[in-house]
């Protein structure tokens, strides 16, 4: 697999030039340099989520010492970073590591068929000009994220007599002028708590921004700057300071998640105390008390108390209620309250999409990933040479991206050493695996999409595990040939003559 047989053939085709795809390319440059690859990106530029979302204040909801890659230090002073800073980080990586020349923008992957006889994926791609072509690759690596780029979740609002502007946060218009306007943001998740203080900020901000929530969300405030990280950068070499800070944050997050699960009442008290410190003892506790325990859904981060500061200044408010109707001049709630609005922003969540909506097949037969089991959180049962990234629900996305990329690079190198062209997690038809619901988070976007999700077993390795510290050790130290992952040559191939060969496209 060291070379390619034709200009359009690659050892690895990476789908998506966001965090996952760029991360895989960077790992390959360092750990699997003998393998050819290309990144196929449907958009006109790299960045994925950080290129798509353009709403005011777009930022990370994880610290950049864990949302950043393990191999590339985060150098900015703020650890809670805005979208442009994250794009700068990704662009620096692709330029410094020679990755940009491997990125093919304007390439949408429509279908991929695994051909066992040739140990090869046949990938159908549509270009920005509308032309279709076929590429072949020994491996397909899906870094396409977990949600639908074309459609957001639509709760089916009847806009009735409302005459103002309605926008969805996923498709933010460039021409939206909200200066001095009354704005209602529908939603209570990470997007809403980012939008509200951003739209209320400054002389060109909205006159008033109301966050209308049906159900409260647990919120956690913290400084946007990590004082310990910035101190360590002054006294330690940059890479060492980054590693120390990264493990500090991973450890604290891990302990916080465990405490929320084992002692939820203590965690509720802790979160309420932080909100009270920001808003004062007379704050509306009900608006910040969800009907579920902390970490049954992802916590919403409030950097530098920005939402609370906007509320204290009277520029923002949180209203809990159910919508009765959209009417002239605003939104009517079922308790008959009227929320004035010139603009309504629907921050109502994502619509999930598995495998980037690519039509995957195996020897011409359609593959339903909901019928396959995860293998080590990055491959699927009885589906060769396909890897995917689905980030942690309880930690930063990039933590999974890093360990998956490292593992697949180890597999690639082992295949190269043995002459194998196929790597398949084999699950016998008569298996006795006990299924487990690892998607036990109550978030709407998870619950709405569980029927699409691949299966998980109680026992490792047939699961998308949710414990990074454990996963990292297993993925790095367990043998590649573990009795489950079958490394072999395609039928009739001779390893000495076929290593590095792919079927020419045509």
Image (cartoon, rainbow, N blue to C red):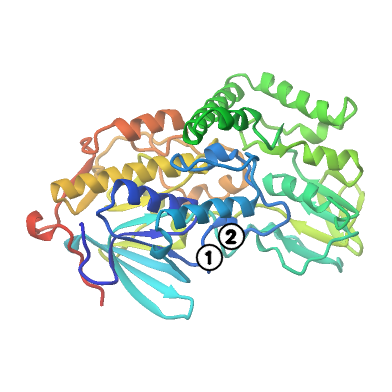
Above or below for 209 versus 504: above
Q: Is residue 23 left or right of residue 503?
A: right
Viewer can see residue 393: no
Q: Position of residue 79 (x, y in %)?
A: 62, 39
Q: Which quadrant would residue 15 be assigned to in this image? A: bottom left
Instruction: Give the residue displayed 60% in from the left and 61% down from the top.
Output: 52
Q: Position of residue 410 (x, y in %)?
A: 28, 43
- Judged from the image, the secondary structure of the residue bearing numbered disc 1 is loop
Q: Residues within 10 Å of mark 2 (few under 14, many from 20)?
A: some
Q: Position of residue 83 (x, y in %)?
A: 63, 52
Q: Position of residue 347 (x, y in %)?
A: 71, 53
Instruction: Give the residue displayed 35% in from the left and 42% down from the top.
Output: 406
Q: Residue 92 got which mark? A: none
Instruction: Give the residue displayed 8% in from the left and 60% down from the top.
Output: 497
Q: Residue 365 versus residue 264: which sits nearer the camera?
A: 264
Read off the residue under disc 1.
45
Instruction: Give the residue displayed 87% in from the left and 67% down from the top.
Output: 161
Q: Residue 162 versus residue 299: which sits nearer the camera?
A: 299
Read off the residue under disc 2.
51
Q: Residues within 10 Å of mark 1 (few under 14, many from 20)?
A: some
Above or below for 145 versus 132: above
Quadrant of the snapshot with the C terminus: bottom left
Q: Are marks 2 and 1 in contact (CB under 8 Å)?
A: yes
Q: Residue 158 versus residue 331: which sits nearer the camera?
A: 331
């Amino acid at each position: 697999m060291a070379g390619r047989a034709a200009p359009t053939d690659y050892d690895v085709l990476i789908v998506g030039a966001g965090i996952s795809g760029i991360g895989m390319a960077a790992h390959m440059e360092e750990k699997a340099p003998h393998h050819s690859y290309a990144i196929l990106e449907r958009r006109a530029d790299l960045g994925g989520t950080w290129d798509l979302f353009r709403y005011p204040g777009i930022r990370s909801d994880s610290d950049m010492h864990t949302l950043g890659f393990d191999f590339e230090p985060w150098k900015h002073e703020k650890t809670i970073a805005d979208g442009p800073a994250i794009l700068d980080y990704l662009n620096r990586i692709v330029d410094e590591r020679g990755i940009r020349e491997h990125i093919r923008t304007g390439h949408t992957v429509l279908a991929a068929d695994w051909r066992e006889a040739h140990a090869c994926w046949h990938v159908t791609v549509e270009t920005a000009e509308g032309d279709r072509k076929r590429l072949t690759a020994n491996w397909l690596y899906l870094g396409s994220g977990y949600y639908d780029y074309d459609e957001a979740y639509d709760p089916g609002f009847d806009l009735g007599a409302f005459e103002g502007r309605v926008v969805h946060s996923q498709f933010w218009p460039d021409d939206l002028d909200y200066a001095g306007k009354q704005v209602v943001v529908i939603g209570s998740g990470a997007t809403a708590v980012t939008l509200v203080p951003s739209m209320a900020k400054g002389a060109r901000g909205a006159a008033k921004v109301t966050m209308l929530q049906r159900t409260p969300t647990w919120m956690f405030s913290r400084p946007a700057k990590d004082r310990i990280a910035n101190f360590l950068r002054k006294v330690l070499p940059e890479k060492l300071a980054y590693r120390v800070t990264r493990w500090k944050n991973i450890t604290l997050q891990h302990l916080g998640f465990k405490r929320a699960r084992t002692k939820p009442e203590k965690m509720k008290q802790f979160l309420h105390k932080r909100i009270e410190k920001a808003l004062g003892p007379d704050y509306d506790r009900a608006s910040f008390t969800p009907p579920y325990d902390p970490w049954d859904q992802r916590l919403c981060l409030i950097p530098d108390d920005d939402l609370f500061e906007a509320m204290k200044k009277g520029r923002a408010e949180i209203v809990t209620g159910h919508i009765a109707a959209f009417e002239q001049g605003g939104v009517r709630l079922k308790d008959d309250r009227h929320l004035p609005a010139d603009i309504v922003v629907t921050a109502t969540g994502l619509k999930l999409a598995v495998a980037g909506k690519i039509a995957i097949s195996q020897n011409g037969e359609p593959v339903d990933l909901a019928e396959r089991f995860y293998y080590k959180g990055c491959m699927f049962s009885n589906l060769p040479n396909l890897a995917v990234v689905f980030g942690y629900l309880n930690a930063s996305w990039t933590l999974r991206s890093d360990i998956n990329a490292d593992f697949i690079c180890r597999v690639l190198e082992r295949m190269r050493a043995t002459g194998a062209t196929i790597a398949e997690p084999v699950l016998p038809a008569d298996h006795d695996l006990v299924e487990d619901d690892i998607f036990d988070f109550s978030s709407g976007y998870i619950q709405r999409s569980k029927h699409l999700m691949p299966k998980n077993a109680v026992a490792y390795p047939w699961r998308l595990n949710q414990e990074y510290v454990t996963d990292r050790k297993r993925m790095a130290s367990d043998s590649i040939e573990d009795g489950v992952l079958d490394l072999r040559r395609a039928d009739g191939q001779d390893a000495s003559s076929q290593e590095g060969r792919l079927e020419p496209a045509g």
